[in-house]
Amino acid sequence: MMSWLTELRGAIPKKFKIPLIIAGVVLFFLTWLLLASGANPIIPGYALPHPSRVWNAFGDLFRDNELVRNTTISIAHNLGGYIKAILWAIPLGFLIGPLPMFRGSFQPLIDAIRFLPLTAVTSLFIVWYGIGSEMKINFLSFGIFIYLLPTVILRIDEVDDVYVKTVYTLGANKWQTIKSVFFPAVISRLFDDIRVLTAISWTYIIVAETTAATGGLGPLTFAAQRQGRVDKTFAILLLIMLIGLVQDRIFSYLDRKFFPFKYQTKPSYDPSDSLKKISVWDSILDFGIRVMGFIFLGLYVLVVINEYTGIFSNVKVLDYFFGDRSWTIHFVILSIIAFTGYGLYKKYVLKIQK
């Protein structure tokens, strides 16, 4: 009955996914309590603080260290680094990957750049861009870029020749082949690679922010370590893990939204098994996200109006929480609006014209 629990690479039944997650989290915290509790804990408090101390440390960080503001600064650095890295890596990858002329010229250089120790070039970015947010975002984008560019080229190589030959047979030229075959195939796979890089990006953020402390979770971590506040360090690390988990869930949702064909099962002789069924909960979640999206968009418009006019309040929310990194928020919101508008245009305007 429960043989799937020990089956190699076995699929987890949907009804057991949430209970297993809860069991894993409970086991983690019980182990933590066991190791850190008592008058003489197994691991001393200076190395592993009790969970209650870590919980109380969140209050100290919120009260004394502007935890919310520093968190939004780090998130803005993360977004800025991703935006710049993606805008550089994808066009360059599609220029170098398909064309032997560029591949032969730049492939050895691209392979060599991957071995750069990023912590060693931090000082160069300070010389080039100063110690402000521009340096941190560019350093992070460079760290993501040197991994993302070779990945784009690799994904281009992995496109099956059957599809290329098929569109050539139909009379497609080189641009049409890139547009209709290479781009959809590469971007759909690249999305998974970007999700993996999310974890690496937080390492680079902490390095960049600690090097030139002008706000963010990096300086908070460094300050907590200097003060011997291990509880604060653990609290910040748990917060980063939570943010990373939320980012991963957002990427997963966007992946399903942008590339629904990836979640179709292979056709079988059983008609009921041809597509994954959409459950009631999936529909409710999708509706909830849409509603929250419209609410968030309305709040964003009000905040932007107040940012430039001060009509609602003297407090400029975006400037306080993000400073000169606010462009990352504008870019993300406007990209979502553009994508949604394009989807509505295809769904209604083009449909009517046909």
Image: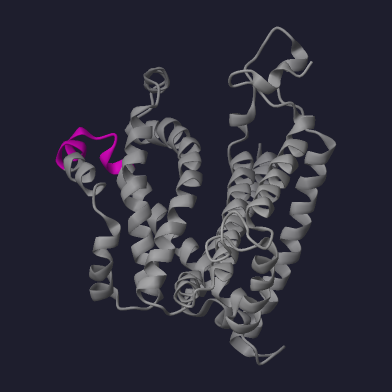
- On the rendered structure, is 24 left or right of 332? right
Q: Position of residue 154 (x, y in %)?
A: 34, 34
Q: Residue at x 59, y 68 (%)?
A: 231
* Residue 40, position as x, y percentages in the image: 63, 60
Describe residue 312's horizontal placement relative to residue 177 as left or right: right
Above or below: residue 42 compared with residue 211? above
Residue 246 lies, in percent from the top left, at: 63, 54
> Which residue corresponds to the image point at 70% horizontal and 77% vertical from the top-left?
302
- The answer to whether residue 284 of the structure is visible from this angle is yes
Q: Main secondary structure of the magenta part?
A: helix
Q: Residue at x 45, y 48 (%)?
A: 197
In this rendered view, identify the residue nearer to me: 229 or 40: 40
The relative height of residue 213 versus residue 159 in the rendered view (above or below) is: below
Residue 241 is one of the magenta-drawn residues: no
Q: Where, by quadrant of the figure, is residue 88 drawn? A: bottom left
Vertical order, 264 against 121 (above or below): above
Q: Farthest residue to the top: give it.
A: 269
Q: Residue at x 57, y 81 (%)?
A: 65
Q: Which residues are magenta?
A: 94-105
Quadrant where the C terminus is found in the figure? top right
Residue 314 x/y as whole percent: 66, 92
